[in-house]
Image: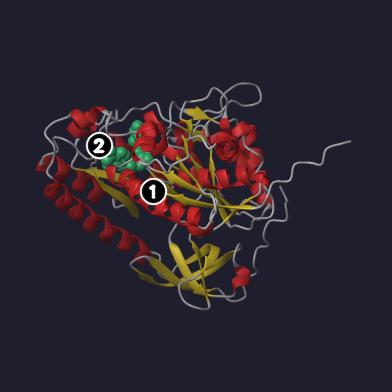
Amino acid sequence: MAQAPHKPLPKKVHIKTFGCQMNSYDSERMAEALEPEGYALTGDPAEADLVILNTCHIREKAAEKVYSELGRMRLAKERRRQEGRGTLIAVAGCVAQAEGTEIIARAPAVDIVVGPQSYHRLAFLVAEAWATGNGQLATDFPAEDKFAHLPERPQGKAQASAFVTVQEGCDKFCTFCVVPYTRGAEFSRAPAEIVAEVERLAARGVREITLLGQNVNAYHGAGPDGRPWTLAKLLRRLAQISSIDRLRYTTSHPLDMNDELIQLFDDEPKLMPYLHLPFQAGSDRILKAMNRKHTASDYEAVIRRVREVRPDIALSTDIIVGFPGETDRDFEATLALAARIRFAQAFTFKYSARPGTPAASLEPHVPDDVKRERLYAVQSLIDGDRHAFDRATVGRRLEVLFEGPGRKPGQIAGRSPYLQAVHVEGPKGLIGQIGVVDILASSPNSLTGVIKSGFEWREPAQAAV
Ligand code: SAM
Ligand code: SF4
């Protein structure tokens, strides 16, 4: 007699994501990988049969948050146990990779530890943990490509904008950074695989794709003839998917910002005028100690070329203050560089020593109060420039991709080409569509505007790929 197909019992999974956009993408893919096993997402950890913490190890604070969250999850697991319900706790992501065995020692309630290169094995690890009651550890860097072993992205989930990881890991070894150790060596997905994923997202109604990579502009995935494609070539191919209206990519490294990619800001209308290009520090001495392999003037030269082809571009960056040995004079060079460039956006961090990285053993450490003052100073400068950038868009007419409800009742919210949040009065039916908005005002974190009357909405994707 033929056996009935295996139909898993319905279960609930709660995923809490820490850190970067790549982790958000990984969380989505983990949820999708668990769906065929009967797991539906829940926002409430108390009703979850499986709790996954997808973690970040980039700074000490981010890693410590995981242990306090695990304390809360342990109590929830115990309450469920008293009610006769089982719970598995999994730690995924970069803390899992860096501290796998320590997690098991420090947090015995954890059942599964899975590194970022092994989450295609998650469904198997979960089944093993349920079946055997034994802890599962998967933190090696497997030879197989995890993307090739994940299920295809399912249809039917409406979403205006989506991330797609195209490149992972890093070979640059900046002395402060854990990424080369937690995400492993640089790896680019094949263009055909990426195009297929974007086509599936387009068929779901996605209008905007942000390509992700720790070093996205070093992308070099092997094309059908085995020859590597550049990021520019990949972007040009994705731009041919007619129902994808907007393309972005992040995060880039200044060394890989080549002319072909810069020229695309002029040549490809679907590529949005926004570039996130970390400079980290303005002092050449500190840049050298960071192993960034470029000077402040090299960075400015890249920015000049970008602005030549796209004068209105919104520039964004990452800045670290208080790297070991950073003097007041070094820090002033950081302020001066930021002031010359005038960023539309920036992410600023106090240096955090990460175990195992070369900078962790550099001296002298900058005292925390000095780091705090420098952070405040650079944030104030950036805030001023960000507000100036936003104010300069008041009075302009911009296309906005509406992504969800706004702050106030009756409002919807979306993003301008420059990635600014824009709020307007409008019906929810316009979510997922691109509209033309007259920008009326800017406030500290967003713009407000009115939908241009008489504008004909562009139809959402009809799988016209
Ligand atoms: N690949 C990107 C690049 O080349 O700049 C950055 C990736 S990293 C996930 C994001 C940002 O975190 C970095 O640009 C840096 O500013 C910051 N960061 C990384 N390690 C850090 C550390 N140990 N302390 C403080 N900030 C750090
Ligand atoms: Fe980390 Fe970026 Fe440097 Fe790579 S290039 S080591 S990801 S900061």
Above or below residue 316? Residue 138 is above
Task: Locate residue 260, reporting x and y percent.
Answer: 49, 34
Tell me which colouring the rendered structure shows.
secondary structure
Tally of marks? 2
The residue wearing badge 2 is: 296
Tag 1–tag 2 contact (CB < 8 Å): no
Marks 1 and 2, how far apart at CA: 42 Å
Task: Locate residue 402, reporting x and y percent.
Answer: 55, 64
Q: Quadrant of the N terminus?
A: top right
Residue 98, label in figure: none
- Res. 240 in view: no
Amino acid type shown at disc 1: Leu
Q: Which residue is at a point 87% across and 36% down the rendered structure image?
A: 2
Residue 70, label in figure: 1
Whether residue 409 sits left or right of residue 75 in the image: it is: right
Question: Within 10 Å of the Cα at label 1, are there few (<14), some (14-19), or many (20+) other Cα atoms?
Answer: many
